[in-house]
Amino acid sequence: MSHTMKNQRQLLTRVKKIKGQAAALEAALEQEKDCLGILQQIAAIRGAVNGLMAEVVEGHIREHLAAEHLDAAQRLEEADKISSVLRSYLK
């Protein structure tokens, strides 16, 4: 079973919080709230997304890179895949 399936409830809770934060940001923009509040909401969303990413990456590393059944070539392939995703995320 995939680590995202094992932690599905926890991950979905995080996603729902992010959706709520994004909805609050949308409402703040529509209501022409002050820019400081909007900036704080954007920072909160970014922090929440970063937390979600960190949790999924950690699970991926533990399950797909540290798995005992993988040989060196498979580990290298998995490392290349996660490196590519991380490079894309950090742009």
Image (cartoon, rainbow, N blue to C red):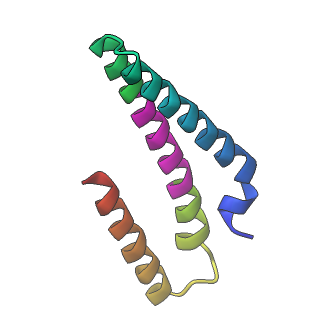
User: Would you say 44 lies left or right of 34 here?
Assistant: right
Q: Is residue 11 left or right of 76 when viewed as pictured?
A: right
Across and down, in percent, residue 80 comes to: 37, 76
Q: Is residue 85 left or right of residue 91?
A: right
Q: Is residue 68 above or below residue 52?
A: below
The reply to whether the magenta stretch includes residue 52 is yes
Q: Is residue 45 magenta?
A: yes
Which residue: 44% across, 42% down?
Answer: 50
Residue 5 is situated, as x and y percent measured from the top left of the image, at 72, 61
Residue 25, position as x, y percentages in the image: 43, 26
Q: Start and end of the magenta stretch? A: 44-57
- Residue at 37%, 27% (x, y): give it: 43
In the image, residue 77 sits, relative to residue 51, either above or below, namely below
The one nearer the camera, 12 or 35, is 35
**The quarter of the displayed image where residue 84 is located:** bottom left
In the orientation shown, which residue stands out farthest toward the front? Answer: 30
Q: Residue at x 37, y 23 (%)?
A: 29
Question: Which quarter shows the C terminus?
Answer: bottom left
- Residue displayed at 34% across by 56% down: 89
